[in-house]
Amino acid sequence: MSADRREPAHTDDAGLLSPGRAGSAAEAATGDAAFLRAMLDAEAALVHAQAAVGLAPEAAADAVTAIAATAERFDVRDVALRARSAGDPVTPLVSDLTAAVDDEDTRAGRDADTAQYVHRGATSQDIVDTAMMLVAARTVPAILADLDRTADALAALATAHRTTPAAGRTLTQHAAPTTFGLKAAGWLSSVRAARTRLAAVRLPAQLGGEAGTLAVFAPDDVTVDGAPGRTSTAASCEPVYDLTGPLDTTMDSPPEPLPDYPPATDPVPERDSEPGPGIDPAPDEPVYDLPGAAPNHSAEAPAESRGAPGTGTGTTADTEAGTVGTTDTGTTTGEGPDTDSDTGVRLLAAYADRLRLAEPTLPWHTLRTPVADLGSALAFTAGALGKVAADVLVLSRTEIGEVAEARGGGPATPPHRRTPVRAALIAAAARQAPALASVLLGALVAEDERPAGPWQAEWQPLRELLRLTGGAARDAAELTHGLRVFPDRMRDNLALTHGVLAAGRLATALTAAVGRTRAKELLGAAERLATRAGIPLAQALTETDPAVAELIGEERMRALTDPAGYTGSAPAFVDRALAEHDARTGTGTGTGTGTGQPPADDAPQVPR
């Protein structure tokens, strides 16, 4: 490229160096335009919350929402450049939003100063933190859906190969035999554990004002002219997509898939597999809403049926006297102090309710548990998927050839190679995730009521974790649904050690025949001979001591040294994993019915 044909410095991050997340639902939900939209949703929700508690007219909330709903009118790049002067993107965005609301008032001939309610009483951190939780709430359902698809595919593999013998490998070497079904069941267990952990993360709204007190709303509890919205209290704001603890052992997903979240940038390329769910709010309702979630309790609900707000660090338990919520800040009961009349508490509740996020017990400017929990769960998920990828990478090596991806490499890949591309991308994500999560864990050490530095350090790592894990979950679903398994190659690899892998089984028979000490001597000599001469272990034992071999019997020795018959409780363990999966998903794939044969596949076998 000539010097006068340089690309502009502000070209979008199109994922050129991140193919794992390119084109995924997570990428669409976490781009700059998506974050801008989330910040606008947070600003609109703030005005609606003020209206709900009588601190702003409904007309102002509607006017701000109408402007915020048109995110395309705001220049993302311009906001980013101007963010340098304030250290965050909210300051320039609020300036633009305020100007747009003023212009709309003028154009519509309205005398009301609607713009005075924009960002009133909030800080930039309130908006960025809430936007991060909104973006996560719009990304996590797609990840959970892909994890469910992956788990279903792994359950099918475990069922089909419940008794398929394969070499167990420890410290890179062949060890006792196992079954491929047990390996797949192990993958399934890890993926389901990751799904459970990610689904348990609480995503709360954030609103605290300058020092976490919302004091700007407290002095006179002033109301304004105009029709206020309905009052919303903490008791009436059960979060819709809570992702909260304790762990949900039923593993229920949202009752119905979400519509695709419309990318605010270029359209996402069509996926080979099912698209992940997303968000598509109506134009007059830009803030987050999750169809199919539990409805909010009414304000008149009896105390014993109401959920207690929390920070996501404690547990709740129902008692006869009502709901008791235990958090890191203490214990509250249904007979505790009445905070529903406090304006700040009511505002926070209405704000969380409008955003359909969890309501925190208190502002969390420097209590970074929500971000650290989310980051840890995402890294754990990436690691669980990385375990699957790591095994596939080993088993698909040319000299092993026990599995292969359905599609490997591109047009330039030689026909004799089936490159495990999906596994490589998943493994790459799994290796990056821990370092990103460590930044979020380090940000827990945040000073004062609002920190300088730790908070800003979270933004990019959290987004990358959402993207990497979302892309890895998408790739894992595609990988596992198309994974090809070669039982014949597994048997060939088992034969490489000439029956030595089953020596433990033969040792039991020898001990009964000649005693433990003599059996150990005979078996050691036979193993060395079998390995050195490349002959079956049964033949080596016969040559070592014909009399003992005759005592056991040639046919029995062959059976005892067949690795396929030395898989122990592997099939039973597979059944247990499948039963747990069926119980959590409500499906009935059945257990103990595997044929040991791979699904029909007309693709060529891996070269041997």
Image (cartoon, helix red, strand yellow):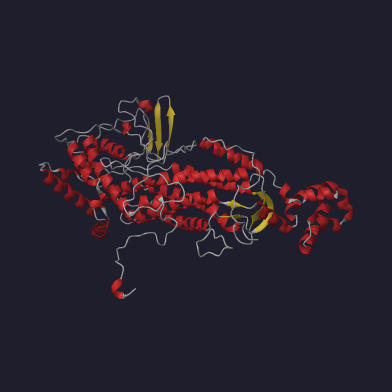
Q: Pinpoint residue 188: horizontal percent, then vertical percent.
A: 55, 45
Q: Nearer the viewer, residue 223 or 73?
A: 73
Q: Nearer the viewer, residue 397 or 134?
A: 397
Q: Pinpoint residue 388: horizontal percent, then vertical percent.
A: 55, 52
Residue at position x 30%, y 75% from top?
3
Q: Quadrant of residue 595?
A: top right
**In the image, is 511 to the left or to the right of 602?**
right
Residue at position x 66%, y 59% from top?
173
Q: Nearer the viewer, residue 365 or 127?
A: 127
Q: Is residue 411 above or below residue 264?
A: below
Residue at position x 40%, y 25% from top?
321
Count of marks placed on residues = 0
Q: Residue furthest front?
A: 602
- For residue 62, say whether it is visible: yes
Q: Pinpoint residue 43: horizontal percent, then vertical percent.
A: 25, 45
Residue at position x 60%, y 56% from top?
604
Quadrant assignment for the C terminus: bottom right
**In the image, is 383 to the left or to the right of 296?**
right
Q: Residue furthest bottom?
A: 3
- For residue 209, say whether it is visible: no
Quadrant assignment for the N terminus: bottom left
Q: Residue furthest right?
A: 547
Q: Pinpoint residue 528: horizontal percent, then vertical percent.
A: 78, 61
